[in-house]
Each structure stands twice: as structure tokens, then as C-alpha cells.
Image (cartoon, helix red, strand yellow):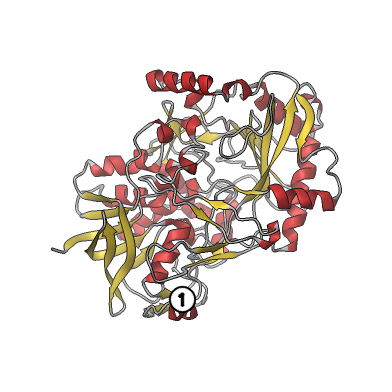
Amino acid sequence: MKKNFDYIIIGAGSAGCALAHRLTEDKKYSVAILEFGGNDYGPLIQMPSALSYPMNMNLYNWGYHTEPEEGLNGRILACPRGKVIGGSSSINGMIYVRGNASDFDYWEESGASGWGFPDVLPYFKRQENSEAGDESWRGKNGPLYITRGKRDNPLNEALVNSAKEAGFLVTEDYNGFQQEGFGPADRTIWKGSRWSAANAYLKPALKTKKLKLYKNALVDKVIFSNNEAKGISFNHYGLHKEIYASKEIICSAGSINSPLILQRSGIGPAKLLKKYNIDIIKDSPGVGENLQDHLEVYFQVESKKPISLYPYLNSISKAFIGMRWLLFKSGLGATNHFETLGFIRSRDNVSYPDIQYHLLPVAVNYDGSSSFKGHGFQLHVGPMRSKSRGWVRIKSNKLITKPEIKFNYMSHPDDWVDFRNCIKNTRKILQQLSFSNFCGKEIQPGENVTSNNEIDQFIIEKAESAYHPCGTMKMGQISNPMSVVDPECKVIGVKNLRVVDSSIFPRITNGNTNAPSIMVGEKASDMILGKDPLPRENLSPFKSK
């Protein structure tokens, strides 16, 4: 028997969870949401300090990798995506960054009309329940709890003071009036636990009884009748199933999986679809193109003082940290340890910040393993607006085939200039008086890495993805052949199908991408329900001189 719903959402990630919540709020509509992953129970997801574990587990991660990246000497990089309710918000670093106001003004100028900063600000505020920040800029009553850490490690103050001494700005709220500068980090952590999109949006929506969650549902394709999206074909616990929507289907499977689903459904570049004998519903050359990401390096420094997390990396200490968290939701397990961020302009002629910093009070790898035996700390640093563009493409018409993911990292010459500026500005900050009591030897890149060629080689060998893929279903005007969705998130050329997730970003935002992904779900929900958009808020954000 074929099941019918008013709306079907593909993907219970950041945007999909927000959509599910808003579409079921008035209990008028029946909604189905399909997620290939399962439940998010257990400390490996819910304990903030355990963030490196789910990111590296096949149970919670799709396990995608890039093709060999020529700009990084053929290295293959991990591209983890959440395979669990909450999507990547259940495996990410829990850092909350809206992006810069100028990011969204660029969106609007590039064809995403109605997505300028005055348009999106009300939706950021609607989603937030922020413990800090000016109420005129921040939301205080939304479902997404945003908190700040204790910042009791002296490295936090040292970084802010040193940045100021180096001529950079300080900010009390990078998500408020002024993004530029160094200051306290906002995190999606509440009462010592990860506050994912599943916790904030999905679980309350399930309580309405108007939402049907299909877990372990692997979506094959959208079912069309002529040019109209009617239903979904998917594998559910090994069985083929179909469900149908009377109103709309919304693809919220993320920047990697959304283009793959559309390509398998017959929407994509005609040449690619013909190659795999897929019937063409709509020749849409932009599907899977425009892939962007943030690339970063770890600038690691030995600490002169025993103030890092190094003593807690052993198994016994981790067990005690875990036990305290399980019993009290407190201690070192209740934070992600990213408690200070920074956004700077690399040079005076840059109009708004183009470099981001995260401070971590230990020298480690992304998988949590120690890269330095002793007390140390690291600054994650990378450019924000790379001009390199890549793609996501199916390699077969078979559902289980891994895709071709190519970011083309460092393929634009400006990327090298931007990254060199990251290294040079970081050294400038670390050489200031406020850091002098803490900074020992430079672990990496190493004090001998000074020339452009040496810095470039370090980047080639050590640069890693910040795991912010986006842009593969670009939003823009219908007249632009590379636009996949219009400013109402409707897939151009077909009916009753929208895409609502980070794949529609015209250009990557400044900082971590979880917050704008949720915002997209919030704003699109009003479009889908036929509601007037929230009134524009014409506040004037900080502008660099």
C-alpha cells in the first residue's frame, strides 16, 4: 500500500529538522521525513567533548572522500557528513556562526533576491535562544540553544589580548553587530549536552504526531509524472518502498547527497545523465557544480606552561571525564573546547573578514589523536572565500555507489596568497607580549618555514577540510543557466520540488555553516506554507574602515 503525505522531506539534517518542526507546528499537515541514519542516543554524540568520535564512525558518518586533489599533491581528503538524525549537526564541532552580513548581501546581488542580510536576520533570530548578545541583534526565544564556554583557560584571554596588540579588533559578539575581531565562541551546547537540530527541532516535532520519521531510509530518487514531483522511491530496511506527497517534496539531504538524488532522478547535466542511462527530466547543468569548502591548517605551538588538555588525553582520564559527564553533565566533557574565535581581514583593502581562527588548548589531530607529546595548543586558521570551485557527481545509476567529489582545492592562484597571509598574520599574533608567557617553540609549520615556497609546501602537506561543503545546488535567477533553484528554493524546470539545505548557498558564508543551514530551513518553511516573510530588519552592521 502506498502511503500519502502532504509534504515529504528527504534528510533529517540541520535544514530538514527545522522544516519538519515548522511544517507541523499548526498540526494541519501530515509530513514524512526520511533519514538513512538512525538514532542519536548515547554519549558519543551527546557529550560535546566526544566530538571526534562520531565524525569518524561509519555508524554516524557517510564516509565520503574526495578524489585525489591535484592542488594538494594528489591527497585524498575525508568529507564526513552526518548519517543520523540531526545530520551533520549531530557530528560537528558545535560552533555557531551566522556568517557575515556581507555574505547575504552578496547572495542577493548574485540573484538570490529576498536573501539579503535584512531578510535573513529575522530568521536567525527566530531560530536562536542565545544566552549572550544584544537582544536587538540576537534571538532569545527560539528552539536552538546557544551558549558560551567558561573560557577559564588563560590561553583564551592571551589570544584576544595578543590579537589586539597586533592591531586586530576585539568583539563581544561576532554573531551580532560586529563579526570582525576576536572574542567568545557561540556553541550549540545546552546544559552540558550537544544541542543538535534533532534535539532542537525534530524531537519536538515528532511529539505532534503529524510527523512520520522513516529511519534507515536510503532514498534512490524522486518519482515524477511528466514534470511534476509526486513521490519518493527508497530502500527501507532492505525493502523497496514508495511514498507520495499531495503538496510538495523537499530535498534537504545536504550539499553532497542532494545533488546525487536529483541526478539519479533525472535532473542534472544531460551529458552526465546520458552516460548512466538515466531518463532526463530536466537538463540542469548546475546540479552538483559550484562545490565550495573551507580549507584550514593547524598552527601548533608548544606551551611554556602546563595549561593544555594534554594530561587528559589518556584512557583513564577520558574515563573519568566521561563518567562525570554521564552523572552530572559537567566538567571537561560538557564543552567542545572551542571557546574563542576570531575573524580578521588579511589586508586593509579587504572589505570584510576573510580569515577565521579557532583556538583549541591542545595540539591534536582531527581524529583526537595526539600530534605532540606534551603541553601545546593550536590555532585552526584558514581563508573564508576561496575562489576554487568543484563538483559532486554520480559514478553510476546504482544507489550504493560512492560519488565523485572534487573540491579542486587550491586551484585558484589567489588561494595561495590568502593562505600565506593566514600563516603570516598568525605569527604576528603569537609574537605579541600577551602570548610571550605561553608560547614555546613552533611545532608546525615550524620556525624554519618562512619563504613562500616553504609555506606553500606546508599547506600542500597539512591543509585539511573544515568540513563545510556547500553550494552544489546554487540558488539564483531562472535566467542563469547554472541556477538550480529559484529564490523560493523551487527546482527550476519542474513542479512541486524544492531544495532546502546548504547546497543552495550561492557562495560559502564566513565561518562554520551549520547556523546558515538551519536559517535556510527556517526561511524556506514560510515560503512552503505560503506565509508572508518575516519583516525585514534594517540594522546597520559594523563595516571595516
Q: Is residue 62 visible?
A: yes
Q: Quick one: label 1, few (<14), some, or many (20+) residues within 10 Å? A: many
Is residue 380 rendered to the left or right of residue 142? right
Q: Is residue 391 left or right of residue 374?
A: left
Query: Residue 262: percent from the left, percent from the top?
Result: 40, 68
Residue 76 shown left or right of residue 239 in the figure: right
Question: Which residue is painted at 52% across and 61% down in the image?
Answer: 471
Please, is residue 311 above or below residue 144 in the view? above
- Please tell me whether residue 279 is drawn above or below residue 223 in the rendered image: below
Position of the N terminus by quadrant: bottom left
Q: Quadrant of residue 301?
A: top right
Q: How many marks?
A: 1
Question: Is 34 or 147 nearer to us in this picture?
Answer: 34
Q: Position of residue 317 (x, y in %)?
A: 53, 20
On the image, which quarter does residue 204 sit in? Answer: top left
Q: Residue at x 46, y 46 (%)?
A: 124
Residue beneath label 1, please?
Answer: 284
Q: Which residue corresponds to the image point at 44% horizontal and 56% vertical from the top-left?
A: 254
- Residue 83 at what x, y percent from top left? 40, 49
Q: Residue 413, percent across and down?
A: 75, 62
Q: Residue at x 43, y 26 (%)?
A: 192
Q: From where the camera sits, is residue 491 visible?
A: no
User: Which one is in front, 119 or 76?
Assistant: 76
Please state which amino acid type lies under the numbered disc 1.
Ser
- Whether 131 is drawn above or below 14: the answer is above
The kind of secondary structure element at disc 1 is loop
Residue that protrudes farthest toward the left in the picture: 1
- Give the vertical position of 523 relative to 488 (above or below): above
